[in-house]
């Protein structure tokens, strides 16, 4: 399969950032995009709503279904899956992108933040997967893609922000377990993570401001890498922890300078790579 024309993608957190980049790349092929995200009203610090993103996806060539979904709540996920079934007749691809982040040590992590990260990252990924699997089973080339890091049980990945690492690795453990569990059903389950920081609102507002943005790559690299994974035969491509530029290099890309926000600035490595 070379494109995603006519495929239905259920993408959590697709109203901005990496989720939106993945959605737009699929929309260019003529895919159906379900934008399962919380932002219905404009946010003072974060660009885009599910409705503005839907317009962009339709302009790019796809069909969009904006759904107000907080993936902490089972009934909201079920309602969005039902709406997807009514509008598009099924689900071919689930992208678990929605994520909460709080980079702090143990004493600086309020339990409210701990709970939020685990409810959205690991539990939300598990919940959305559970609700989409019955529809994915009926698809021709079904994929689940989690935006989570390669599993690596070294202390250095945990020590600076143990609560966040646990929550993100929970998403990666879903890949490890579900890839094997769903192999007989032909459903691929993979993870994708960036080599470098990605120029998103989260990086700008929470991590390092404009300096870190200049040392980042554009979200489009994740959109292109996800597209390369999701067009693979699902029975032959599962259980992998992919890194964005490795995926594109395997497909023949040699020049990555176009993805850099500022080609003259040294790239900032992601803190899980």
Image (tube, grey):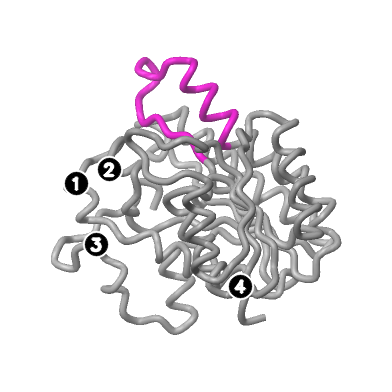
**Picture quadrant of residue 159:** top left
- Which comes sooner in the sequence, label 3 or label 4? 4
| Residue 44 drawn above or below residue 32 | above
| Residue 175 drawn above or below residue 233 | above
Residue 68: percent from the left, percent from the top?
61, 38
Identified at 67% across, 69% down, the residue is 237
- Choose mark 3 or mark 4, whichever is in front: 4
CA–CA distance between discs 2 and 1?
6 Å
| Residue 162 drawn above or below residue 107 | below
Confirm whether the magenta stretch covers residue 146.
no
- Which comes sooner in the sequence, label 3 or label 1? 1
> Label 3: few (<14), some or many (≥20) within 10 Å?
some
Identified at 29% across, 37% down, the residue is 205
CA–CA distance between discs 3 and 2?
13 Å
Residue 76: percent from the left, percent from the top?
70, 34
**Picture quadrant of residue 222:** bottom left
Task: Report the residue marked by disc 1.
Answer: 210
Q: What's drawn in magenta, residue-wise?
A: 99-121
> Label 1: few (<14), some or many (≥20) within 10 Å?
few
> Label 4: few (<14), some or many (≥20) within 10 Å?
many
CA–CA distance between discs 3 and 4?
27 Å
């Amino acid at each position: 399969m070379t494109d995603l024309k006519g495929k239905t993608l259920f993408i959590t957190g697709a109203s901005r950032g990496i989720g939106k980049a993945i959605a737009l790349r699929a929309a260019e092929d003529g895919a159906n995009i379900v934008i399962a995200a919380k932002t219905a009203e404009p946010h003072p610090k974060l660009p885009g709503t599910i409705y503005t993103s839907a317009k962009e996806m339709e302009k790019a060539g796809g069909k969009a279904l904006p759904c107000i979904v907080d993936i902490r709540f089972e009934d909201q996920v079920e309602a969005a899956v039902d709406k997807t079934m009514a509008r598009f007749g099924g689900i071919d691809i689930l992208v678990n992108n929605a994520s909460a982040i709080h980079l702090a040590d143990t004493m600086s992590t309020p339990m409210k933040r701990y709970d939020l990260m685990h409810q959205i990252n690991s539990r939300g990924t598990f919940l959305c997967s559970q609700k989409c699997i019955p529809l994915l089973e009926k698809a021709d080339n079904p994929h689940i893609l989690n935006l989570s890091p390669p599993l690596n049980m070294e202390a250095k990945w945990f020590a600076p922000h143990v609560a966040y690492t646990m929550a993100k690795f929970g998403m990666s453990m879903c890949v490890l377990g579900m890839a094997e569990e769903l192999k007989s059903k032909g459903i691929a389950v993979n993870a994708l993570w960036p080599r470098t920081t990605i120029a998103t609102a989260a990086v700008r507002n929470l991590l390092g401001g404009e300096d870190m943005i200049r040392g980042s790559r554009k979200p489009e690299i994740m959109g292109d890498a996800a597209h390369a994974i999701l067009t693979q035969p699902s029975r032959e491509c599962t259980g992998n922890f992919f890194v964005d530029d490795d995926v594109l290099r395997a497909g023949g890309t040699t020049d990555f300078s176009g993805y850099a926000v500022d080609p003259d600035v040294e790239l900032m490595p992601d803190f899980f790579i």
